[in-house]
Image: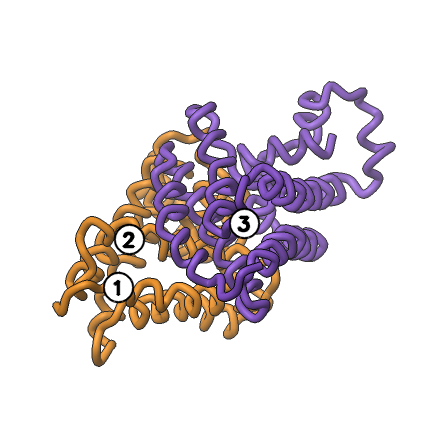
Chain colours: A orange, B purple
Amino acid sequence: MVFSAAQLMRRRGVAATGMRDVVAHARAPRGSLQHYFPGGKEQLVNEAVRWGGNYAARRVARFLAALPEPTPSGLYAQMVRQWTDELQATPDATTGCPVAAAVVDCVETTESTRTAAAEAFACWTRPVARALTDMGVPSARAESLATLMISAAEGALLIARAERDARALTAVARELGPLLDAAVTRRP
Amino acid sequence: MVFSAAQLMRRRGVAATGMRDVVAHARAPRGSLQHYFPGGKEQLVNEAVRWGGNYAARRVARFLAALPEPTPSGLYAQMVRQWTDELQATPDATTGCPVAAAVVDCVETTESTRTAAAEAFACWTRPVARALTDMGVPSARAESLATLMISAAEGALLIARAERDARALTAVARELGPLLDAAVTRRP
């Protein structure tokens, strides 16, 4: 059900994601929602946000393992390609990021969701920054470059969803690649 | 009322922005909504999205006029500072971007809002790309760099709102500045 909630939030935002839709999407028995989520929608949304952060973080390790020679631009191209592939596969259902949805809809009203979103971004930033450091980027810059990579991908995804076109995502990966590789100051 | 709708969308998203809240925020008479917005909430949201794009575009000219010596990094610092200033002025009410809110909440369900959002991003990107070209950036790169600038700012604003801290915004402006200035290949 956490997975289903995240998938619906990615497409419609948090406000339009009803508890009944989540149960239907997950093909779960009706009563299971109250059983597993006594905190109601707030708890379910927060767990979906955490799921999103953990999922993105785990993907970083998979991308790195798949690169024959890891470079910052190679890692970033993989991170962005995850979204361009998805956009191209489902042009009518442009799915976004569940954490971004939580920020837009809940930051002002629901403090627990705000902190869950901040933790999800941090959970994703950490392995990216660590990967940069491992590739030879000075640790003083690794975190801010990781923040830039994630920021640019999140913003380009907003533009790409509005345009129903991956153009913004590919532009961001292409323009940032050389900057990221130039930040490597020592052989790992 | 368009301004009020945009302000509420920035804080709570589109779904939680009720028509009555907009009328109350604008201190407008109740009947005026049906009079000016016969297309209902969809029309009002789309006009708020357009307002957001036009506002951001107009600010670009103002930022340029205020810079003693226009540079890409100087322009970007001003664009980002608009949001860091706002975050620091109102730490409890972290306002976002009305166009981002429309994308998250409406892209899948409301086609007219999706195209309004795409046009708003384009409306903002054009003057940024033109400014880069005027500063000596080759026209082949100006548009994709403008897309990167706006993407990174939008994504960093999501992180900053979640963290209630301008850190991501300042990191993005600091890291992108040298890349942008290095794209200048001729004296304007």
Q: Name the residue: 55% across, 67% down.
A: B138
- In depth, the one of A52 and A82 nearer the eye is A82
Any part of residue B107 in sight: no
Q: Chain of mark 2?
A: A
- Residue positioned most to the left: A188
Q: Position of residue B131 (x, y in %)?
A: 60, 54
**Callout 1 secondary element:** helix
Mark sitting on residue B104: 3
Q: Chain of mark 3?
A: B
Q: Position of residue B135 (x, y in %)?
A: 56, 56
Three-letter amino acid code at the position of disc 2:
Trp
Three-letter amino acid code at the position of disc 1:
Val
The quarter of the rendered structure image containing the N terminus of chain B is: top right
Q: Position of residue A108 (x, y in %)?
A: 46, 30
User: Do the residues indicated by labels 3 and 1 lie within the same chain of the protein?
Assistant: no
Mark sitting on residue A20: none
Q: Badge 2: few (under 14), some or many (20 or more) residues near its Cα, within 10 Å?
A: many
Relative to residue B170, is residue B11 depicted above or below?
above
Instruction: Give the label, 3 or 2, closer to the camera.
Output: 2
Residue at numbered disc 1: A60
- In depth, the one of B40 and B169 nearer the eye is B169
**Callout 3 secondary element:** helix
Q: Position of residue B55 (x, y in %)?
A: 66, 40
Sequence order check, earlier mark of 1 and 2: 1
Any part of residue B10 in sight: yes
Residue at numbered disc 2: A124
**Callout 2 secondary element:** helix
Three-letter amino acid code at the position of disc 3:
Val
